[in-house]
Image (cartoon, helix red, strand yellow):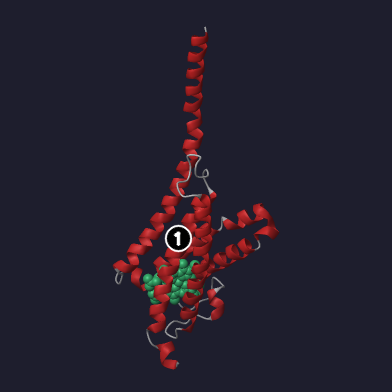
Amino acid sequence: MGALLEGPLLWYLNRGTGLTLLVLLSLTTALGVLAMGGRPAGDGGARVPRFVSQSLHRNIAVVSVLALVVHVVTAVLDTYVDIRWWQAVVPWGSAYAPMWTGLGALALDVVVVVVLTSLLRHRIGRRGWRAVHVTAWVGWATGLAHAIGMGTDLQPGSWTWWALAPTAAAAIVVLGALLARLQGRRPHHEAAVPLLARTTDTDTRSLEVLR
Ligand code: HEM
């Protein structure tokens, strides 16, 4: 048991689950952005039906929580780094990389609150739930900052392609989803203008024929 806690196995598990977690949380965030915004499929809006993105969003969120549990347990059990149980939830006071560990703890807190309020959604009402749910952005951003600041495989001197590529892809997917959602709103608004113009043209022509 002692060898397990002191050897590199926990560290490998921690790094592996950290990256898995970042990718899953980013997918969850991107799917949430797409599922909550824009128009329903068939209205010239989302290409992926909303119920598909919503159920994927939920299922990936559940797997993310499992990865988060393993990531935290391995960080705390690993005797090479001095991180106590409470420091995984309280965002300050860690002796090891205080700022980056604190950001990880903050991300964890946000994830926990977002998941719990989602489970209690029918009790707290849609407005309250949504007000809390938007803080998922803070969770995603602080999780990303924690990873960039703390990950062995993401540091200038020791970075690896297998860590850098998924981290960059994760950020691009989330920002891409945000852009797609903002764009999805614009045409809806703009499309109304040419449609009105077309209607007016046709109406005018119809009136001319009648005359
Ligand atoms: C949503 C929350 C979190 C996310 C998304 C996340 C993600 C990550 C990622 C991607 C890495 C980099 C792995 C690598 O490339 O080496 C990492 C490293 C690390 N994380 Fe987290 N983490 C989170 C929360 C936490 C918490 C709460 C703790 C414990 C307090 C923690 C402890 C660590 C440690 C010790 C490392 C350094 C591993 C190394 O030496 O490379 N993380 N995390």
Seen at 37% across and 84% down, the residue is: 8
Seen at 44% across and 88% down, the residue is: 5
User: What residue is shown with label 1?
Assistant: 26
Seen at 41% across and 78% down, the residue is: 13
Mark 1 residue type: Ser
- Residue with the most extreme right position: 123
In this rendering, is residue 100 above or below 204? below
The spot of residue 101 in percent (x, y) is 48, 72
- Residue 124 shown left or right of residue 31 in the figure: right
Q: Nearer the viewer, residue 141 or 211?
A: 211
Dot 1: element:
helix
In this rendering, is residue 193 above or below 96? above
The spot of residue 16 in percent (x, y) is 39, 74
Does the image show residue 141? Answer: no
Ligand 1 within 8 Å, label 1 CB: no
In this rendering, is residue 141 above or below 13? above
- Residue with the most extreme bottom position: 2
Mark 1: give few (<14), some (14-19) or many (20+) Cα within 10 Å: many
State ligand 1's quadrant.
Answer: bottom left
- Residue with the most extreme top position: 211
The spot of residue 52 in percent (x, y) is 50, 54
Quadrant of the image containing the N terminus:
bottom left
Number of marks drawn: 1
The spot of residue 113 in percent (x, y) is 60, 65
Does the image show residue 35? Answer: yes
Q: Nearer the viewer, residue 208 or 108?
A: 208
